[in-house]
Image: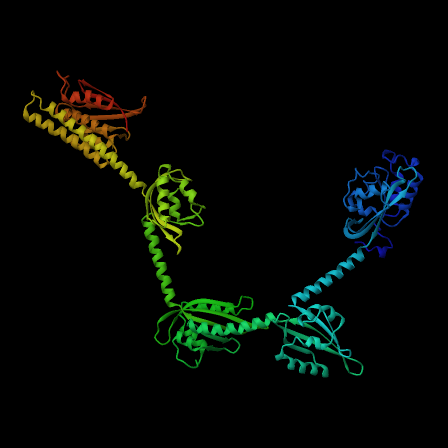
């Protein structure tokens, strides 16, 4: 806020006369007030009055409350100056209580003789752009005008700077608040003033209440005897002697004593005072303060009890105590501490060397670093370490845990104390636990096992990472029982829910052993899960947790399904094979054939059928590759140099593999007996391709013989030709055509790929 007293102004921010020039140059005809020549004498006088004033003043005139103001008022308007000059109240909305419309309207209407707004905080904008905060008292006064209906033509707004007064009052209140806070923070401070000559003690309410004296009487002064009634009998004589001594000397009066309260309780207080003397040296007044130290005394008593309890607890826990003075190097170990380190009872000649000698070499550097940190004033001054020692009496390795704290005075460590305990059994148990957990983790990992834990009360479900994978959920995501059921196949949900309810039923406590399907929430994959679990109950029989393990058995389920399909397929194939064998036998042992020829042909065809079965068996009857059939054909009939194989790998269904194997056997047998494979220079070319079909792709295979003897078409169709041309068509919904060309047999086969 501007110091207006130094400038001789209230708010000297505008150049003197600036607003007079603005008012004279303003186009008042464009405002509700009309041209200046038409103004009433009251308005003209009021404007001249505020312009001449060096105090912040403004005028609101007429029903529209048009604003006119002087140079001292301009800074109160901030960035709105000078554009609000001549504006109505509606055009220049209020920004503070200084421009409240209601009180101004009341003055203008003659309903109010004026109004005062006390100590209003306002901002002042100075010519240099800076803004300061101050307090102003606003006075609204009516300006008479005979021409106005109410007799009041406008409202005079006058501001008085009261910043200094408000600041002084605020500082006084703050000082009083700080004083009261200081009294409260001092744990119950009371003050007293004893007029020794008149024997009257003047005390504040806190001091009076502590001494069971009425606060009003204490404020007016009461005899010392009324205050001494509250003294504890055990402290009375001591306090009386100390008081007499202080009256005879110049020393400060400082005592701690007990006061018996009105309710019979006891308070501890500390008083500190000083005697004032007259010109002759006589004690005339005794003033001082009293502090409630009941809490401190209780703390001290509790500390003494705690120290006694600590000594008992240390002994009961088998802890050893140590005390080290870093300044002198002295170190004290109690009897239990020496026993832990395996040292003989009595004084240790050089404790630091004994300590460093007994600590395991691998642990000594880290331990000494921890000691140095604890002795650093900038640290928390504590140590808590576990380390190994080699016990002095037998060299046994033992685990030791130490707790300690360093105490400082003027930045120097003056004491470093703590306790030690032998934690070897605990460390061995922890190591055993870690080993068991690691073994369990390996077992779970090797068995692809996930674990789960359901908190019944919180309905919170916790899974291991592998458990998340089994439900197709990103590991770490928040999951509950609803998520568990939502990820389950609808057909398996109810049975699983019943199994969980039975496990949580105190009367049943059934173990969970279910298999169900999950639909991965994040990956959408279907999996088969085997879950086993068990419920746990509190003492009242209420279920608290259900824990268990899950195993992904998807592959097993698929294998079982495949096995069922395989058995069904084998049953079908066995029947078909028996039918095929029956047909082969019937055709082979035709009456027109000799028995030796029939046996040879029958054996060869059965071997070909067995070869196809063997190939399918190795593929789990899921199918066979065409190249595998042709490779076996090469082996049986002259080797790869007699065959030219041309084509890409093609997967055949079991049914097609059997049929095509028999066809190729018949073609190869005829070629060995009569065709290209009957001569050394003959060769068979087998080429194929896969072409689109109306329902599924179709295999087109061509068998071409070259280099054999001239070919004569047969006079009749034998079993092999009928098997090729008719059997293939019936079995594979395909067709086969054999051409007995002079330079070699050509067989073209086309069949649907159905697997």
> Can see residue 35?
yes
Residue sitting farthest toward the top: 715
User: 620 or 73: nearer the eye?
Assistant: 73
Residue 158 place in picture, x, y as percent: 85, 48
> Can see residue 633?
no
Is 134 placed above or below 570 here?
Answer: below
- Coloration of the structure image: rainbow
Residue sitting farthest toward the right: 41
Q: Quadrant of residue 103?
A: top right
Residue 494 place in picture, x, y as percent: 37, 40
Q: Quadrant of residue 751?
A: top left
In the picture, the quarter occupied by the C terminus is top left
Left or right: 594 in relation to 560? left
Residue 674 place in picture, x, y as percent: 13, 23
Q: Residue at x 39, y 77 (%)?
A: 343
Residue 298 place in picture, x, y as percent: 57, 71
Residue sitting farthest toward the left: 595
User: 75 or 611: nearer the eye?
Assistant: 75
User: 267 or 161: nearer the eye?
Assistant: 267
In the picture, the quarter occupied by the N terminus is bottom right
Left or right: 166 in relation to 26? left
Residue sitting farthest toward the front: 263
Left or right: 443 in relation to 312? left
Is 344 placed above or below 608 here?
Answer: below
User: 731 or 483: nearer the eye?
Assistant: 483
Counting every numbered tag in the picture gives 0
Q: Residue at x 5, y 25 (%)?
A: 595
């Amino acid at each position: 806020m501007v110091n207006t007293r130094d400038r001789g102004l209230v708010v000297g921010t505008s150049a003197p006369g600036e607003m007079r020039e603005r008012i004279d140059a303003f186009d008042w005809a464009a405002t509700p007030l009309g041209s200046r020549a038409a103004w009433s004498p009251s308005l003209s006088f009021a404007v001249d009055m505020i312009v001449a004033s060096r105090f912040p003043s403004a005028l609101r005139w007429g029903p529209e409350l048009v604003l006119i103001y002087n140079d001292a008022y301009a800074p109160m308007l901030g960035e709105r100056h000078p554009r609000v000059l001549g504006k109505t109240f509606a055009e220049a909305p209020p920004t503070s209580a200084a421009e409240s419309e209601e009180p101004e309207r009341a003055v203008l209407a003659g309903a109010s003789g004026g109004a005062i707004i006390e100590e209003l905080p306002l901002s002042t904008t100075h010519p240099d752009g800076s803004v300061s905060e101050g307090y102003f008292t606003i006075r609204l006064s009516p300006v008479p005008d005979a021409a106005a209906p109410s007799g009041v033509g406008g409202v005079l707004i006058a501001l008085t700077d009261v910043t200094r007064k408000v600041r002084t009052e605020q500082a006084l209140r703050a000082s009083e608040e700080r004083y009261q806070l200081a009294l409260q923070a001092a744990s119950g401070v009371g003050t007293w003033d004893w007029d020794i000559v008149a024997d009257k003690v003047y005390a504040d309410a806190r001091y009076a209440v502590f001494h069971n004296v009425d606060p009003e009487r204490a404020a007016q002064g009461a005899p010392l005897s009324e205050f001494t009634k509250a003294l504890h009998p055990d402290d009375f004589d001591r306090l009386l002697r100390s008081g007499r001594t202080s009256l005879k000397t110049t020393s400060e009066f400082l005592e701690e004593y007990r006061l018996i309260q009105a309710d019979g309780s006891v308070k501890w207080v500390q008083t500190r005072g000083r005697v004032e003397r007259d010109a002759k040296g006589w004690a005339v007044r005794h003033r001082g303060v009293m502090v409630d130290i009941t809490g401190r005394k209780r703390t001290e008593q509790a500390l003494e009890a705690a120290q006694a309890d600590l000594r008992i607890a240390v002994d009961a826990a088998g802890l050893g105590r140590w005390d080290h003075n870093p300044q002198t190097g002295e170190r004290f170990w109690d009897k239990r501490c020496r026993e832990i380190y395996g040292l003989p009872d009595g004084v240790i000649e050089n404790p630091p060397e004994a300590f460093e000698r007994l600590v395991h070499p691998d642990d000594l550097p880290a331990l000494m670093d921890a000691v140095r940190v604890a002795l650093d004033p900038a640290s928390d001054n504590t140590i808590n370490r576990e380390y190994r020692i080699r016990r002095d009496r037998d060299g046994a390795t033992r685990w030791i845990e130490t707790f300690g704290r360093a105490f400082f005075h003027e930045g120097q460590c003056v004491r470093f104390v703590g306790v030690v305990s032998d934690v070897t059994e605990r460390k061995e148990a922890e190591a055993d636990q870690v080993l068991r957990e690691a073994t369990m983790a390996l077992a779970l990992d090797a068995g692809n096992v996930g674990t789960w834990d359901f908190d019944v009360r919180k309905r919170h479900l916790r899974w291991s990472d592998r458990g998340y994978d089994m439900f197709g959920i990103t590991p770490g995501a928040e999951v509950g029982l609803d998520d568990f059921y939502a990820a389950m196949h609808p057909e398996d949900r109810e049975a699983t829910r019943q199994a969980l309810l039975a496990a949580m039923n105190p009367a049943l406590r059934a173990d969970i052993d279910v298999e169900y399907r999950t639909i991965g929430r994040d990956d959408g994959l279907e999996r088969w899960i085997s879950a086993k679990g068990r419920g746990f109950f509190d003492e009242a029989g209420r279920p608290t947790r259900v824990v268990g393990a899950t195993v992904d058995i998807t592959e097993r389920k698929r294998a079982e399904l495949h096995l069922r399909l395989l058995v069904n397929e084998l049953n079908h194939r066995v029947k078909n094979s028996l039918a095929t064998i029956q047909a082969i036998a019937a055709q082979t042992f035709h009456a027109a054939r000799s028995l030796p020829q029939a046996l040879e042909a029958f054996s060869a065809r059965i071997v070909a059928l067995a070869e196809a079965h063997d190939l399918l068996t190795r593929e789990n009857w899921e199918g066979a590759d065409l190249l595998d059939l042709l490779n076996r054909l090469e082996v049986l009939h002259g080797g790869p140099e007699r065959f030219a194989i041309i084509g890409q790998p093609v997967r055949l269904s079991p049914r097609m593999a059997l049929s095509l194997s028999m066809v190729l056997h018949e073609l190869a047998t005829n070629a060995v007996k009569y065709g290209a494979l009957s001569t050394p220079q003959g060769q068979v070319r087998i080429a194929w391709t896969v072409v689109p079909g109306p329902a599924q792709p179709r295999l087109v295979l061509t068998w071409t013989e070259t280099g054999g003897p001239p070919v004569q078409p047969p006079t009749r169709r034998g079993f092999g030709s009928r098997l090729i041309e008719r059997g293939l068509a019936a079995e594979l919904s395909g067709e086969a055509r054999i051409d007995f060309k002079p330079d070699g047999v050509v067989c073209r086969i086309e069949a649907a790929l159905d697997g």
